[in-house]
């Protein structure tokens, strides 16, 4: 599942905002950087994507006194339905396109209902990271894996503004700990290498790609405390002791891989498609890390479609111009303009 286009209607002062996410060959771009200052709607676009995906289409929130807001998303199903030649169009439940005839509305809604059911059964990998994300010093909490890191919940709600639900520590530690424990238990039982060995190996490789310029690598699990441990230039440290910029990278890799593994239990998660949203990717990153991070994400999971937002020129400086969609508003109440290519990275 990859996103080809998103259209927002009634959510801003302008009538429509259409973001084309395809490359010059007509295929969905695997990395999209939404670049712009405050007030141009970057977070609103990510929220609209999260609210118009197969398995989870919900009503958009309108501006007070404004027209009804809705979003229209066109998805390439790819591995989720390789025989399908055309895009799946998903609308919010309160939406109807102007030119649609009654029979077209009925057909589209039936098709959307069909894929909502299919998405609940597996596949259609999706996860998101709020711009309000943070890291507490919570200890690792072990619970039933089937209800935690192995659980595929395509209907999970997404919030990009609620910091009370944006602590990444416990989820990240669960993935890191369970990966090692499950793989070790499988090996000790004499079983053939399987799902957990594949996931543990994938996790190490993804984190190695994301941390290649930091001197940090995943080491293992503390046998007494079950806390994930890392080698930091020869020094053994736990997740809580690492700089925040590195913890962010670890969370991006671990939680994205967890979503892919849960959605596709019979596949190497590095080979799976999915959509990962990151709001304010520059949060708690130094300038060098901001410039490096987009390319590292792309290299760590190349089949994933990363859609990230930023207001940082440093992030854009590390991007190919084809990755960037710049959103600009010339006046406080004017429409948002979209710039691509060289025009997206020039001021």
Image (cartoon, rainbow, N blue to C red):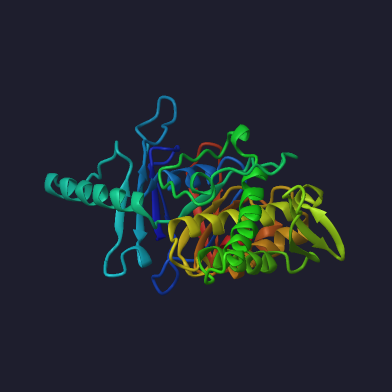
Quadrant assignment for the C terminus? bottom right
Residue 262, image x, y percentages: 47, 55
Q: In the displayed structure, would residue 82 be above or below residue 149?
A: below
Instruction: Name the outermost residue toward the front.
Output: 189
Quadrant assignment for the N terminus? bottom left
Q: Residue at x 78, y 54 (%)?
A: 286
- Total tally of numbered discs in the picture: 0
Left or right: 111, with 23 as reference point: left
Q: Residue at x 55, y 63 (%)?
A: 196
Q: Residue at x 72, y 64 (%)?
A: 211
Left or right: 68, with 37 as reference point: left
Left or right: 122, with 227 as reference point: left
Residue 157, image x, y percentages: 46, 39
Residue 279: tell me if it is visible: yes
Q: In the displayed structure, would residue 292 be above or below residue 149?
A: below
Decide which of 84, 316 is in the foreground and name it: 84
Decide which of 257, 95 is in the foreground and name it: 257
Decide which of 194, 333 is in the foreground and name it: 194
């Amino acid at each position: 599942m990859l996103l080809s286009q998103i259209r927002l209607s009634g959510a801003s002062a302008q009538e429509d905002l259409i973001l084309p996410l395809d490359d010059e060959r007509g295929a969905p771009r695997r990395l999209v950087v939404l670049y712009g200052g405050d007030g141009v709607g970057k977070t609103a676009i990510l929220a609209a994507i999260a609210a118009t995906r197969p398995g989870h289409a919900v009503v958009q929130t309108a501006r007070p006194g404004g027209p009804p807001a809705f979003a229209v998303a066109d998805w390439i199903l790819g591995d989720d339905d390789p025989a399908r030649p055309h895009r799946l169009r998903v609308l919010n439940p309160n939406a109807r396109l102007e030119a649609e005839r009654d029979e077209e509305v009925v057909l589209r809604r039936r098709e959307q209902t069909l894929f909502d059911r299919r998405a609940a059964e597996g596949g259609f990998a999706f996860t998101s990271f709020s711009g309000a994300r943070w890291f507490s010093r919570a200890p690792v909490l072990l619970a039933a894996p089937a209800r935690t890191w192995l659980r595929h919940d395509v209907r999970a709600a997404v919030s990009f503004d609620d910091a009370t639900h944006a602590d990444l520590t416990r989820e990240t530690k669960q993935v890191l700990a369970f990966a090692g424990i499950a793989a070790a238990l499988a090996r000790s039982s004499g079983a053939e290498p399987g799902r957990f060995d594949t996931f543990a190996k994938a996790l190490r490789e993804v984190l190695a790609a994301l941390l290649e310029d930091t001197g940090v690598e995943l080491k293992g699990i503390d046998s007494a405390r079950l806390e994930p441990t890392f080698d930091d230039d020869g020094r053994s440290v736990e997740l809580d002791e690492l700089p925040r910029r590195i913890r962010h990278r670890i969370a991006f890799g671990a939680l994205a891989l967890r979503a892919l593994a849960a959605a596709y239990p019979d596949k190497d998660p590095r080979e799976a498609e999915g959509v990962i949203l990151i709001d304010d990717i520059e949060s708690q990153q130094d300038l060098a890390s901001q410039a490096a991070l987009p390319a590292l994400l792309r290299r760590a999971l190349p089949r994933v479609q990363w859609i990230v937002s930023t207001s940082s020129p440093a992030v854009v400086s590390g991007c190919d111009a084809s990755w960037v969609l710049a959103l600009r508003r010339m006046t406080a109440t004017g429409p948002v303009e979209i710039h691509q290519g060289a025009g997206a990275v020039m001021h």
